[in-house]
Image (tube, rainbow, N blue to C red):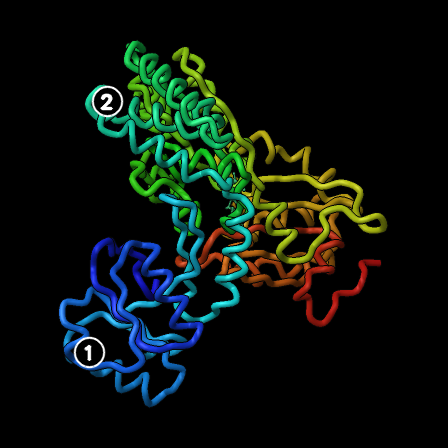
């Protein structure tokens, strides 16, 4: 982050605008809309700046801009120079203004057009009257804070207020009815004795935060506590409520921290205490995620639990690497399989299953396989797979550090070695003729005879 976004209270403060063109006028108008006492000048003298909270310079002329900027600097008044980011103490974001609700977008001066495009998108999704909703909330703030002491219940009240009937009335323009509805909700909230918690077992997808489902993103914004795996990258966690409680409960191989039983117990404890808990798991919670065990534990304790699916690694990696998992000519089936030979995976590693998996026309997406590449290769070859069968390895699929390599089954161990180093990210092995279609396959791998 290049600049810290702050919202500056300018009401009644002196703001100086230097310049006379449209850019200067726009800045003067903006400062006035925030209640500033604006003085717009063609030229600058030190005396004009005395007591100013900020100065905007937009003379359109480099020399004039520079001189004015120096004067402001000398007097220590924060300065913004239109279109000259290098001369700025602060920059002007793209703004969506809905009364009390203001969204500011900045690209750090790098791409104002991108900021303007984003503003357009945000304007399209923000209801016109969202400002009235903020006003409604403001009139209740003190009451709510004194009447509802418990933070989790207070948050639940605000959530209902900004999403429920009162919000809809406010946005429809009926402020009086909105106030009545909000008062009713406040009464309900005071009467309700124990808060009711819930756990959501949520798929975080393969790492690209834009691959979160809308539901996952919404729950992350509302959660009281987030229990997440190590595999969930910080870019995804950044979409969550800042003041949620974050617990990394990952169980990296060989680096056991939380046992499954401890995680289950923690979920139960927090939901009982009334929290809205998000259990955030890489990919999909029900694909090699042990989500099933957490659901069982919560149900056994009689607590509410809901499951939100996610884009599993096989789908994310395949899409990102350009590998179709099925293909009209090359593969009519795909199997998600664990390459890890830990006892808990016995069910999928039973010898009998491998011949079926090794058949032609069948794609394998192998999870947790990079460190077990030799055994994966041997089992497939023994089961009759062709040594020249194309394979691809996708490390950190869908993430900025994504790395894809392609080769042949006979060569899988060598290929996997670089993806199984200590600092390597998670990687997925794809075996099957479709692997030759990976966008990075160079030179293109020929079809297996
Ligand atoms: N529930 C998860 C899988 C957890 S098992 C899901 O549905 O995706 C952990 C394995 O998932 C890793 O060993 C790796 O094989 C795979 N994996 C998870 N995220 C990945 C990613 N971004 N790129 C490649 N493989 C990934």
Res. 253 visible in picture: no
Check mark 2 vs ligand 1: CB closer than 8 Å? yes or no.
no
In the picture, the disc for residue 73 is 1
Q: Residue at x 48, y 31 (%)?
A: 173
Q: Nearer the viewer, residue 8 or 221?
A: 8
Residue 240 at x, y percent in the picture: 39, 42
Q: Is residue 169 above or below residue 81?
A: above
Total marks drawn? 2
Instruction: Please report the residue visible at 80 percent of the width from the left and 58 percent of the height from the top.
Output: 448
Q: Earlier in the sequence, mark 1 or mark 2?
A: 1
Q: Measuring 52% from the left and 67% from the top, which residue is drawn there?
A: 113
Q: Position of residue 209 (x, y in %)?
A: 49, 49
Q: Which residue is mark 2?
A: 150
Q: Decide: marks 1, 2 in contact (CB < 8 A)?
A: no
Q: Quadrant of residue 92?
A: bottom left
Determine crowd level at label 1: few under 14, some 14-19, many 20+ residues with C-alpha closer than 10 A: some
Closest to the observer, 29 or 274 = 29
Residue 156 or 269: which is nearer the viewer?
156
At x 49% / y 27%, what residue is drawn? 168
Query: SS for tag 1?
Result: helix
The answer to which of 260 and 369 lies nearer the viewer is 260
Which residue is farthest bottom? 63
Residue 417 image point, x, y percent: 51, 61
Q: Is there any visible trace of residue 37 in the rendered image?
A: yes
Q: Residues within 10 Å of mark 2 (few under 14, many from 20)?
A: few
Quadrant in the rendering for residue 29? bottom left
Q: Quadrant of residue 146?
A: top left
């Amino acid at each position: 982050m290049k600049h810290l976004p702050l919202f500056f209270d300018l009401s009644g403060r002196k703001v100086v605008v230097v310049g006379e063109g449209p850019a200067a006028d726009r800045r003067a108008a903006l400062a006035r809309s925030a209640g500033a006492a604006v003085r717009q000048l063609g030229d600058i003298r030190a005396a004009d700046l005395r007591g100013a909270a900020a100065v905007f310079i937009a003379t359109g002329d480099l020399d004039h801009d520079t001189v004015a900027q120096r004067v402001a600097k000398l007097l220590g008044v924060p300065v913004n120079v239109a279109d000259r980011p290098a001369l700025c103490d602060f920059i002007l974001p793209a703004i969506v203004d809905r009364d009390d609700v203001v969204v500011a977008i900045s690209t750090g001066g790098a791409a104002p057009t991108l900021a303007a495009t984003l503003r357009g998108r945000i304007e399209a999704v923000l209801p016109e009257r969202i400002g009235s909703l903020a006003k409604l909330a403001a009139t209740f703030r003190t009451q709510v804070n004194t009447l509802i002491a418990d933070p989790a219940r207070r948050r639940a009240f605000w959530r209902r207020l900004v999403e429920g009937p009162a919000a809809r009335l406010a946005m429809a323009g009926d402020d009086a009815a909105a106030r009545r509805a909000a008062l009713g909700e406040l009464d309900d909230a005071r009467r309700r004795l124990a808060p009711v918690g819930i756990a959501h077992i949520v798929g975080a997808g393969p790492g690209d935060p834009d691959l979160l489902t809308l539901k996952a993103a919404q729950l992350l914004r509302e959660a009281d506590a987030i229990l997440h795996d190590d595999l969930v990258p910080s870019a995804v966690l950044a979409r969550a409520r800042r003041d949620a409680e974050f617990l990394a409960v990952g169980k990296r191989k060989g680096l056991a921290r939380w046992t499954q039983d401890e995680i289950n117990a923690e979920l139960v404890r927090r939901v009982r205490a009334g929290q809205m808990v998000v259990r955030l798991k890489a990919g999909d919670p029900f694909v090699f995620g042990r989500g099933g065990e957490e659901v069982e534990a919560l149900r056994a304790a009689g607590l509410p639990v809901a499951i939100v699916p996610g884009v599993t690694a096989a789908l994310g990696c395949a899409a990102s690497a350009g590998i179709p998992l099925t293909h009209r000519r090359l593969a009519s089936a795909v199997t998600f399989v664990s390459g890890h030979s830990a006892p808990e995976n016995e069910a999928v590693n039973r010898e009998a299953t491998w011949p079926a998996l090794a058949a032609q026309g069948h794609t394998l997406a192998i999870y947790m396989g990079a460190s077990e590449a030799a055994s994966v290769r041997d089992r497939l070859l023994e089961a009759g797979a062709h040594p020249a069968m194309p394979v691809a390895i996708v490390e950190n699929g869908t993430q900025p550090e994504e790395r894809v390599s392609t080769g042949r089954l006979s060569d899988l161990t060598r290929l996997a070695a670089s993806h199984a180093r200590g600092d390597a990210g998670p990687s997925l092995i794809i075996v099957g003729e479709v692997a030759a279609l990976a966008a990075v396959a160079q030179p293109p791998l020929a079809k297996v005879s």
